[in-house]
Image (tube, rainbow, N blue to C red):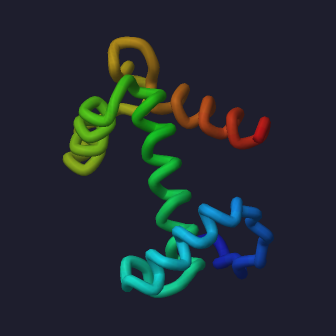
Amino acid sequence: MSKPTKASPILVQLTAEDAADLQARVERGEFASLEEGVAAELAELNYRRAADIVGGSEELEALLDELVDEEFEPAEKVAGNISLSEMLADLKARAADA
């Protein structure tokens, strides 16, 4: 079992317009805090990237359903051209390049 890691603070720079929009969303109650709003936006970005890799949101949802049902093999091709193992390797490579 791995030891939990402590979150480290980071600096995120937004345009004045994006910062104001995010603050307004917090004030409307859409998010409990700026941190929650930024985390939600990053999660949405990750979702869109994953959907792009597998060929669209419908394909991603189908893949996620298969994973939940535990009927998926990591080496099995999804969307006809890439395996989950290859997809994860691609995501790691993209993250390293960023």
Question: As rendered, which of 20 and 67 lies closer to the eye?
Answer: 20
Percent across and percent down for residue 60 are 32, 36
Q: Residue at x 25, y 50 (%)?
A: 68
Question: As rendered, which of 16 and 88 lies closer to the eye?
Answer: 16
Q: Quadrant of the N terminus?
A: bottom right
Seen in the image, is 87 located left or right of residue 15? left
Percent across and percent down for residue 34 are 57, 79
Q: Residue at x 78, y 36 (%)?
A: 97
Question: As rendered, which of 16 and 62 lies closer to the eye?
Answer: 16
Residue 11 location, quadrant: bottom right
Seen in the image, is 34 located left or right of residue 71? right
Seen in the image, is 95 located left or right of residue 97? left
Q: Residue at x 66, y 39 (%)?
A: 92
Please count the marks in the image. Answer: 0
Percent across and percent down for residue 18 are 60, 62
Percent across and percent down for residue 53 are 47, 28
Q: Residue at x 40, y 35 (%)?
A: 51
Q: Quadrant of the C terminus?
A: top right
Residue 42 location, quadrant: bottom right
Q: Is residue 13 above or below residue 31?
A: above
